[in-house]
Amino acid sequence: MSHALLRCDATPEGGVGHLVRVLSVARAAREAGWTVSLAGEVTSPLGRDLLAESRLERVDVPAAGLAVVAAEQGAALVHVDDYATGPEVRTELALAGTLLSSMEDGTFGRRPADVVVDSTLGAEDAGRPDDGSGVVLRGIRYAPMREDVLHARERRKARVPRDPGGPLRALVVAGGTDAVGAAAVLAGVARATARVVDLVVVAPVARWDDVRALAGDDVDLREPFPGVLDLAADMDVVLSAAGTTAWELACIGVPTVLVAVVDNQVPGYEAAVARRFALGLGTLAELRHDLVAGAGRLGALLDDLSRYERRDGVDGRGASRIVAEWDAALRERTRALAPDGRTVARPATSDDALVLLRWRNDPSVRAVSRSSDPVPWDSHRTWLARVLEDPARRLYVVEHGGVQAGTVRFDRLGDEQGGETEWEVSITLAPEARGRGMAGDVLAAAEDAFTAEGQGARLVAAILPDNAPSQRLFARAGYAHVPHRRDGDFDVLVKERRR
């Protein structure tokens, strides 16, 4: 089991589109056996509702940076879906041995990564500079879709076909926060069109007066809510900003009229209209300049809605494809741990702080540790500095074929009968090294380095009785159970190791 840390924000100013994508990826990751958590600021009311519904743990991003929280979470991979994180993040995460997956929208949010995803329509046909990234996934087939979208898609399939020449029921959505007031403009355009007789507008309460001013008092106003996609599935047409919701509506199959609300939506808007995924009204600035002209354009578009009720371009499986590439990237990293590689141990240094913390906080390691609580960064740095200076402790990082494979620590317990010094042994394998039969080599390499420093000692291992893999590891390495000796809930195994 690997852990993924998902990085995004959902604020009234920035909207919830990034969070919607991240929650879709989180669901697919869980289904594939990953554990997941989210790092970021979620202050939008709709964002909070969506996060609560997902039951995803949220953590803050500390001033020390994303690599620190990744190590605190024991994350093998970080998936970034925001525009603010800089290109240096891949190098920073590498210090923790953590892979980077990055979501970009054309040039927005572009950064080097081990896995790059650009799920905008037509991205596969656009050029992208070679920035040293690993695998690059481009095109609408990688668009992450929430489970709600797939449910709404099935709901739409079961809908009774409408009368082609009859009045229309229309829905206006402009994002969970509507930071630029697009809902009122879209509602005004829809209301000025004679074909629309039933108009539902989903917008924050703070925007309702603006909506009424342009569309009248008989508009059905609703606050943003998680089930809005089921509502969209029942509509004749949806007017929407050309953000994340546009691809969700395409997956559902409801005819959609798009508006490019902000600059970063323009490429996706143009591609959707050109490939007939949606109808286009232009930019929000154009509509604001002339609502009447916009209403005229909308009226003409509504005459041919049936041509835009399609589900053949967005199948809803984009998130699963992304996670499959995560698994492939982790497998690729483990290939460096080839069986014929040389295993050597070296003394740990302060430069190993992040990777040691990530290994310690990996969920499977915490489950068999004396304390299952995650270790915070500040405590870990203090602890590591103390260990490196303490003559009663030895800490080694073991590398196999030049790749970090694990760590082994020796803690002096004191002198037993006959003046023999006892040292307790603790081993942690890198998550990517597990299941490859390497634990014995890692332990042996560390013991060799320990005795090469002139240490002759009795080595002691304290192991939980039900931790069968560790019991077998130390037994094969020559450690024997000491009858009637216990360390709390732990069995005690002992080995004599001479110089």
Image: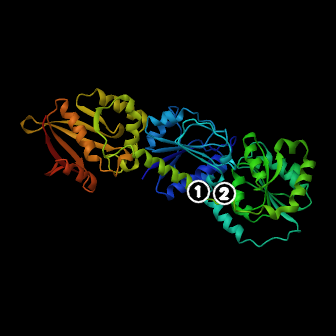
Query: Label for residue 89?
Result: none
Please say if the residues under marks 2 and 1 sit with CB atoms less than 8 Å apart: yes
> Which residue is located at x 19 percent, y 31 percent?
452
Could you tell me which secondary element the residue under label 2 belongs to? Answer: loop
Query: Label for residue 53?
Result: 1
> Which residue is located at x 89 percent, y 68 percent?
165
Q: Is residue 481 above or below residue 412?
A: below
**Type of residue at label 1?**
Glu
**Image side of residue 330 versus residue 482, left or right:** right
Query: How dense is the environment of label 2, judged by Cα within 10 Å: few (below 14), some, or many (20 and up)?
Result: few
Q: Is residue 168 above or below residue 448?
A: below
Viewer-closest of 214 and 182: 182
Label 2 – label 1 distance at C-alpha = 9 Å
Viewer-closest of 433 and 387: 433
**Image side of residue 338 versus residue 257, left or right:** left
Q: Position of residue 157 (x, y in %)?
A: 70, 69
